[in-house]
Image: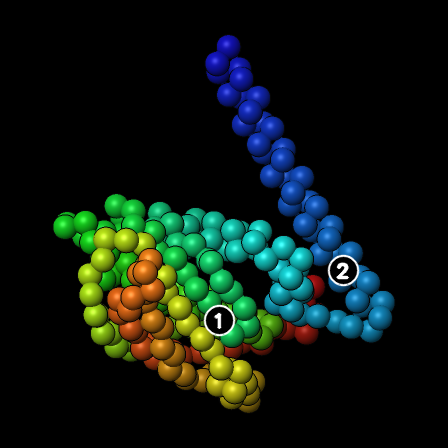
Amino acid sequence: MNQQWLTILMSKGIELEQNLRQQLQNAKDGLKSQLEERGIRLSAADLAALLEEVSPKASHAALSYALDIVRPFSAGMGLRISRLSDTQVEMVVPARTRNLNEVKTMHEGALVTAAIEAAKLLWMRHAPMGSFEINVTRLESELFKVTSEECRVRMELPETVREVVLAEVRDHREAKAEVELKVFDSNDQAVAEFRLHLSFKHTPALPGSEG
């Protein structure tokens, strides 16, 4: 009997997930169609940003889930998106066993991983259509204190810096940039700072491949 109930619950869970995905796709298609009727054609990134405005919490939850499943290296870390806009990102690093060292304090490697993921996530919001690669070429760090609590990694991306880099990407298909990320504990005390040197490479989408 227990096995039967478990099977039913799993079936209902899969059905609910499929329905939610279909509703999201229908909303996306409907919005895209209405905009195109008005002569507005958006990229996939722009359309995703519009959907995020409808339900930012759901969008953040989906991104957090993807980070925990899709990224092989960070899978299981439980990284969570608590804030995301065109200019800011905040990522939570929970104090779970995987992220702690042998004395139960936050592992430096967990903070580095979260900083890299946060930086890539924010830049990918502005990715041009096609293949857009982001690689870390150099990393500088400064650690201020140890903590056994969850940490928050924060980054700001000024619009002027973003536009300069994206213009270079459009013109030369490549660009470089430096970004700074700061880490805080639950009391908003500084834990660490990271400076990442990033390289960008863009391969434009082929004509007719969009949408």
Label number found at residue 31 = 2
The image quarter in which residue 22 lies: top right
Residue 144 x %, y %: 21, 70
Rate crowding at label 2 as few (under 14), some (14 to 19) or many (20 or more) other CA atoms within 10 Å. some
**Secondary structure of residue under mark 1:** strand
Question: Is 32 placed above or below 1 here?
Answer: below
User: Relative to 95, is 173 above or below?
Assistant: below
x 62%, y 65%: residue? 49
- The tag on residue 88 is 1
Looking at the rendered structure, the kind of residue marked 2 is Leu
Compared with 162, 105 (above or below) is: above
In the picture, measured across the screen, residue 21 lies left or right of residue 32, that is left
Residue 124 as seen in the image, left or right of residue 145:
right
Q: Nearer the viewer, residue 198 or 90?
A: 90
Residue 73 coordinates in the image, percent (x, y) = 33, 55
Label 2 residue SS: helix
